[in-house]
Image (tube, rainbow, N blue to C red):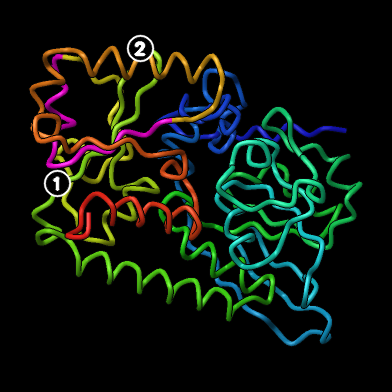
Amino acid sequence: MRVNSKINYGLNPVRSLVKFAQGRFTSYLHQPFNRQRRFVVLAGSAALVTACGQRQEQSETAVPSKEKVIRHGLGETAIPANPSRVVVWGYAMVEAVIALGMQPVGIPGIILEEAVYIELDKAAIANISETGEPNLEAIAALNPDLILTTKSLGESSYPLFSQIAPTVAFDVDERVEWRSLTRFCAEALNKQSDAEKLSADYDAKLARLKSQLTQPPEDIEASIVVFLPNEVRALGDNSFPGSILSEIGLSRPTSQSGRTDLRNISLEALDQIDGDVIFVLTTKSNTELADRIQAEVESVQTTPLWQQLNAVQNNKVYTVEQYWVFGNYIAADLVLEDLLLHLTTTS
């Protein structure tokens, strides 16, 4: 039986981006997968799910030594003290679990097929979704001892998930609260020391980047742009890459400050995406959608209005890959590497 999770992959911001690599990453946000939205979902996941209500407080209470109780966004769940067969119904969350040193037994197919920068044991990990909805039979067949999801993604499926295995639904916005998400996952997986190391290593890389910037971060205005068929978008602070730029202290164009995204930018309004530097999100997939996106990029970049942008005239436009769309520590480290390459004294 297959359950309709009614997930609104709320990636308002780049719903087509989700099709990154075939548009399959699409489901990341809250909308049923459809070929046109996949690249967007990934790419802009900028408008993923807005965390609602108060944040869950996860705590371990006095229970038998083989179990612990986790309080989360949808209640309280007793889970194994050291789970070993974990199903993940989430997107950035998959990366968090991998970064913590564990291979899930089941994840959404879009991640399995498209997240090429994550080391996944594809022979041992099952696809639990082909259409953006969780396949309950596939999940049950894996005999999981824990299911991890988020409140926004898993609320409607939570009762059914809980009949299969103990389920924890974190009340967190994967776009910008990815560091908290990793910490929450670590508590559930008994991987707290791994999470602390990830955080410390990331902070060290942030400090290194800041120390090597060519000028104070607040003096560097960085723009993040997504091209979709017949559309240009920009990602704001409330997005995965935007959250990283905010931690560094880089400034953003007025049009992107505090926004999840800026949609349907006309050629006449391209000045809204200008900055000292422009990062253009691209996809490397061999698909019709990828070809259409590339055609859009080439079409816009040959216009006189594009050529007049300051970043263009100063040769400060850089293409970046799908790990800028959404992710966790693995993707964030790659984003920092790109920034080190393009913005520092060593570049």
Residue at the (22%, 66%) spot, across then down = 210
Q: Amino acid at mark 1?
A: Glu
Q: Which comes sooner in the sequence, label 2 or label 1?
A: 1
Residue 230, numbered circle: 2
Disc 1 secondary structure class: loop
Q: Which corner quadrant of the image does residue 298 belong to?
A: top left
Asked if 16 appears above or below 252 in the picture, the reply is above
Give the image location of residue 177, x and y in percent.
44, 58
Asked if 168 appears above or below 310 in the picture, the reply is below
Q: Is residue 269 inside the magenta stretch?
A: yes
Give the image location of residue 77, x and y in percent.
74, 67
Q: Is residue 11 inside the magenta stretch?
A: no
Residue 221, numbered circle: 1
Residue at the (51%, 17%) spot, across then down = 289
Asked if 142 appears above or below 131 in the picture, the reply is below
Q: Quadrant of the C terminus?
A: bottom left
The magenta span reads: 268-282
